[in-house]
Image (cartoon, rainbow, N blue to C red):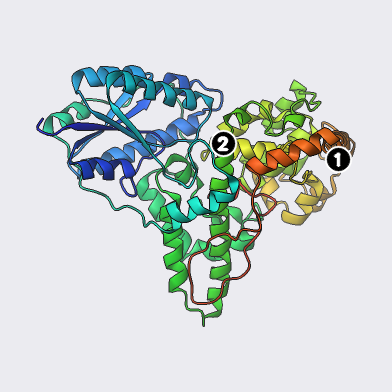
Amino acid sequence: MTRPVAVWWVKRDARLADNACLSEVNRLGMDVLPLFCFEPSLLAADDTSDMHVHAQWQAVTGLRMALRTHGADLVVAHGEVVDKLAKLHARVPFTHLFCHEEVGNDITFRRDRAVAAWCREQGVEYREFPQSSVKRGGVNRDRLQRWWQSRIVDVPPLPVPLIRQADELRRLAATTTFPKLAAFTPIRQWQPVSEADAHATLADFLTRRGRWYRGGISSPNTAFTAGSRLSVHLAWGTITARQVWHAVARRLAELDLADPASVRWRQSLEAFVSRLHWRDHFTQRLESEPELEFQSVHPCYRDVPYANDERLHTAWREGRTGYPLVDAVMRCLNFRMRAMAVSFACHVLHLDWRLIHPHMAGVFRDYDPGIHLSQLQMQAGVVGWNAIRVYNPAKQLADWDADCRFVKRWLPELNPLPAVRIVNGDNLPGYPPPVVPFAERAKQMTDALYAIRKSAVAKAATAAVYLKHGSRKKEPTVRPKRAKKPAKPTTPSLFAGWDTDGSAG
């Protein structure tokens, strides 16, 4: 090899475009050797599921195919990453290790520190590049908007750079294959995850489906199509928020403001941009305080009296609570209803948000720890300043699925029954009665939470926690430029965060 080698450690960034690692390797005139590692510690984590493993396998497979069109290849390894880096370094004495910043769980946090320590010991230059507006190590909340502006708005996405890879590196990479992992059967309905799929999904949203985003994502019956369906791509890094933001900006600039149809397009796309911005807001919370994986961000809510009845936990997981909309949501887990699923588990079944975390994480293909953990705490009412939201399943059913199309799709045992009977909560043959009384149980938990909130100690702590983690609602969300004066910023919906992550739709 005549050029020095840099390893690009692929994590949640399986793409060629808008890739700071590849661009820096190209700028330095080095050969690149991409490395992806299936790590046993991550595969065994309680918040990892077959759905996640399949998504990442699919994303990396697509990346490998794309690299090969550029005359390069990717090393696939199976083992803890420090061990694999050491073995690779013995064979190919690379001088640089590049990766994108990842805001993950405690396992990935400790892993990243171990990799940094190994690089220091070996004299390998280790650099992490941001791929969002999230500031490493935390930042004053008043300055978050500046990071969004400087990283997302002011900088265009990076083009695919020249990719250099010596023949011997390409031959080495080509000999590596995907390991045989625990057998699982991919489900046809699982959304495809690759860089090509990400851009096709974005194009479809901006030219067809996105017109109905505003309002359309509120119903479980329309959210599947009205939503952007970009959350899975943002979660696994097959597209970046910067790429999405600039694509939306171009689309807004193209709108014919004289066309009445453009009004709805503009409203929908601006609502989407607002939620895209909030995605980084919630991720920053985990980056600033990694302990929130294990304890509430507010110290006074760390001993909420949860019962953690395993019988109720099982009924909730399996969709057998006796509340039709809750059970349909748990069997489908449409993104728009995540908030209700968590609220019902914590406020009505009295289950700890930490107890339900692994199951909720595992059933979402777009699992992103920063958003997931922040939203679990917000919907559980343990953040301290957000409204305590208890969604009445009967009212939600009447409001959003009165004809029971959604419920009957996911609870086939209710298909023979008329919708009015299901909505009215009559005795339903072949379906379990409610496992607990809704109103009584909800009052017990909300009384406990409000008692904490009203205490002098909690009020004092809330001010400090909000200063570190709270949103700055008076600061306007930066929007793509357009010909007319922008409307007032859209405030986050009741589901802010889980519909801001790009499932944001």
Location of residue 80 by image quarter? top left
Left or right of 185 on screen, residue 18? left
The crowd level at tag 2 (other Cα within 10 Å; few <14, some 14-19, many 20+) is some
Q: Which secondary structure lies at badge 2?
A: helix
Residue designated by label 2? 288
Q: Which of the image's four quarters has the N terminus?
A: top left
Vertical comparison of 50 with 21: above or below: above
Image mark count? 2
User: What's the residue type where badge 2 is placed?
Assistant: Ser
Residue 492 position within the rendered picture, expressed as x and y whole percent measured from the top left: 65, 55
Residue 379 position within the rendered picture, expressed as x and y whole percent measured from the top left: 71, 40
Q: Does label 2 or label 1 sit earlier along the sequence?
A: 2
Q: Residue at x 51, y 83 (%)?
A: 258
Query: Which disc number belongs to residue 124?
Result: none
User: Which one is nearer the viewer's eye here, 204 or 79?
Assistant: 79
Point out the residue furthest to the bottom here. Answer: 258
Residue 500 visible in this rendered orientation of the protein: no
Vertical comparison of 429 with 313: above or below: below
Query: Which disc number belongs to residue 427?
Result: 1
Left or right of 320 on screen, residue 273? left
Spatial CA distance of label 2 from label 1 is 49 Å
The crowd level at tag 1 (other Cα within 10 Å; few <14, some 14-19, many 20+) is few
Residue 22 position within the rendered picture, expressed as x and y whole percent measured from the top left: 28, 42
